[in-house]
Amino acid sequence: MPRSPRDNQDIRDARREELLSAAIRVFSERGLGPSKISDIAQAAGLSHGLLYRYFDSKDAIFTAIVERQLSRIDEDFAASDVPAFERLARLVEQCGARSVRPDDAWRVISQAMMTGVASDVVRQQISAHLGQVHARLTAWIAEAQRDGDVDAAATPAELAAALMCLVRGMTIRMPGMELPFAMPGAETILRLLRHPTPTPGAAVAPAHEASPAPSRRSPRSHAPRPRRT
Amino acid sequence: MPRSPRDNQDIRDARREELLSAAIRVFSERGLGPSKISDIAQAAGLSHGLLYRYFDSKDAIFTAIVERQLSRIDEDFAASDVPAFERLARLVEQCGARSVRPDDAWRVISQAMMTGVASDVVRQQISAHLGQVHARLTAWIAEAQRDGDVDAAATPAELAAALMCLVRGMTIRMPGMELPFAMPGAETILRLLRHPTPTPGAAVAPAHEASPAPSRRSPRSHAPRPRRT
Amino acid sequence: MPRSPRDNQDIRDARREELLSAAIRVFSERGLGPSKISDIAQAAGLSHGLLYRYFDSKDAIFTAIVERQLSRIDEDFAASDVPAFERLARLVEQCGARSVRPDDAWRVISQAMMTGVASDVVRQQISAHLGQVHARLTAWIAEAQRDGDVDAAATPAELAAALMCLVRGMTIRMPGMELPFAMPGAETILRLLRHPTPTPGAAVAPAHEASPAPSRRSPRSHAPRPRRT
Amino acid sequence: MPRSPRDNQDIRDARREELLSAAIRVFSERGLGPSKISDIAQAAGLSHGLLYRYFDSKDAIFTAIVERQLSRIDEDFAASDVPAFERLARLVEQCGARSVRPDDAWRVISQAMMTGVASDVVRQQISAHLGQVHARLTAWIAEAQRDGDVDAAATPAELAAALMCLVRGMTIRMPGMELPFAMPGAETILRLLRHPTPTPGAAVAPAHEASPAPSRRSPRSHAPRPRRT
DNA sequence: GATGAATGAGGATTCATTCAT
DNA sequence: GATGAATGAATCCTCATTCAT
């Protein structure tokens, strides 16, 4: 008895998912350029010939990865009634956790961004997506500033940019080789946003605070600024 | 009459530099894999055949770029008698400035790290170099902590890692396409290290400081903190 | 439905043989250096791309030819209970016959020896093989001397060397062009070893001449023939 | 004071000779294909650019070598009033001696014959030359047969072919690598032609055997021997 | 649907040859 | 005359893609 069309479709969809996931793994491991179509097929456990029934080309695979990833923006930035800072913290934590995994789709995207393999269409999509992310981040950060959870010494846009760079910087790693240092934790990353209020004891300011080093007062110093009253 | 040996050497040296520089430009634009030898030759204004009198292979060009770049670590971490924090600030500023230029050798290196095209030898070198950078950064940060310029809420090693990720994240950009947001300035990056000292008046701590949330001592808490009423 | 693994293997084996044989033909005609990979592929009736599924490189093809040929030494020097001279005669005859054919693998090997294109490993193998051949020939010749079928005026080693040079000299010929003289027959080559018994008076002969081994009377034996009166 | 035109011509001729000789050395050492123009120029101590003032192309160099060598046929086969066998013996000895030297032009020609690098014109020349050599050898051998110095069991043409193969076989050797056995001496080679009288029983011998020239027992004598009256 | 044999466009590399100096 | 910088045709090899079975 032949499979029902429905079953067939299910099988196809599952295969497609497997392939996408295998592709991310392979790209992420070996890098985009050196990864061969047959590597991906092998990783997914089928022949490279069959792979072409699911994707038109190597490029199509990559495009599919990108699109799937980009479409998740709404999950990442899901609305919620927790305070903005809390939402930011969760987001950072997710990204941090992801960037440690070897099959991070974002790593693949970072690769592709840098190596110019992607087609112009995809590149436009990525660019647009990054703009979206930046905009949403900026909005959240602004909200967190209004909440008083992020200081106003830097603009939300710049803070968003810094956050994005930091998180994406964590995706740079060499396939098959550990980095010689550990990735920073979410807490550390969040220092960009929230400056921990110093301990009460700090009130008795350290000696050198009395005669502040000029360098610390130099242009790039953030002048201490009164927070909310 | 043949050119004098001196002339020849001059020509050779100049060309080698041109080539290296052209290669960085081309790799940076197009990525390591997709860049053809003839692209580089063309960018440097010579035939691909001649290029091979200067470098043995495409790989050799990349290796030369990497080695030149890695050898600059001592310039970047030059000793100086200014306070550690000041030195860190300058370093960050340099990196920031560099990462905006389209011919950043570090972008090429980041690419190569991710795309797995580099030879194992070079990859080892890069890894060792990153270890060095991290170690030196950590030392400087520790010193800045002792100076009181960096708070002790995070370990120097983690702060160093965060800094490195952030700065390297800034090298990720698409060739021939502006990112949809501006890179963060040095001042913003430095927020990772130096948290603005709250106002002296803060010594008279707000109510909730009186009973510091224990969570703040826990490694990665971003404990919700009492909002202003 | 895919071909059965068995079919595939059969196809593969057949093709490999075809390729090897085509390669010998092409190399033999055009010489190792000037033969293009695509020449071989074309001669075997497949695309150059496919050729690489059977051999890693041009060099690998040559190596395979050499190794197959070298491994036949045991066939050539198969033990047998006929007298040593008879065995030598057969060997010479085989080589002579082979050297006339245009697809003599030994011609390819001779070429490669002289033109320095072969890798060092293969060259070592060839050298070792020649040593082997010489050693075995020497042993057979010594035996034939003991049998009285070869005179003792020359050392077995030197006779072996002369035989080898002669036979290998027969492999030197220009592709696509007849030599302006005919190759010597086995009978003539064997003159190096066995000297025809001269005068009829020699009838008064050494013991073993009395009951001549039949083999010595065999077709290829030089009937003693009267010289000038 | 400029050199006289005559001096210039002398210098040119000398250079040309040096180049030809260097080319033979290089080709012979490295093989024809792998030898680069600049190898030859370097071996001759001049720049590859200058080389083109003496020869039009790589091919022209090879052609010049061949032609020079072929033109020496008359030296090799110089008439002389010694018996034919004696002349053959000398010829063989010369060839043998030559084939041991690493700069044997004949090795280069053998290479070229086999590897198909030579142009058709040269190949025709070589072929014609070989025909000449064979013809002259045949004539000498026939003469020696009439003299009774070579038995008549084989035709002169076949003996000539065998001699040529043997001598040319001695030119097959791997550049930079000793053969694992010694080349046969002239005496051994000459066995093809003259069969030493074998057994003691031969004492009951033809007339001229009665007073055996002592020289016939010496390893490589081809002492003139009494002709039949 | 599956397979992997087959193809060929594309890019690295070599080296004979030319030519400015 | 000399030199060696410069060129580009030619060839090896890889791998995405197609297609017979």
Image (cartoon, coloured by chain):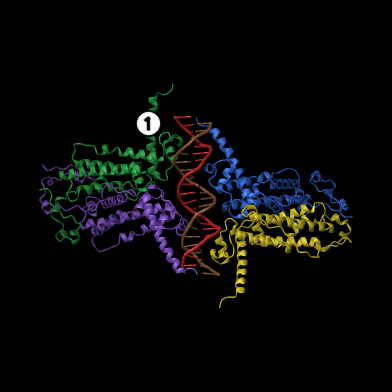
Chain colours: A green, B purple, C blue, D yellow, E red, F brown
Q: From the top left corner, tell me how far across and down residue A74 is, in percent.
A: 26, 37
From this view, report whether residue C84 is shown above or below residue D137: above
- The quarter holding residue D181 reads bottom right
Q: Is C76 positioned to the left or the right of A174 in the image? A: right
What residue did someone put label 1 on? A13
- The quarter holding residue A70 reads top left
Q: Is residue D174 visible?
A: yes
Q: How many neighbours does mark 1 have within 10 angstroms: few (below 14), some (14-19), or many (20 or more)?
A: few
Q: Residue at x 37, y 31 (%)?
A: A13
Q: From the top left corner, tell me how far across and down residue C201 is, in percent.
A: 88, 53
Residue D205 vs residue C68, the one in the foreground: C68
Residue B134 vs residue D151, the one in the foreground: D151
Quadrant of the rendering where the N terminus of chain D is positioned: bottom right
Q: Looking at the image, which residue sits at the far top?
A: A1
Q: Residue at x 81, y 48 (%)?
A: C222
- Disc 1: host chain: A
SS at mark 1?
helix
From this view, report whether residue F8 is shown above or below residue D74: above
Q: Amino acid at mark 1?
A: Asp
Q: Is A196 positioned to the left or the right of A23 in the image? A: left
Residue F19 vs residue B114, the one in the foreground: F19
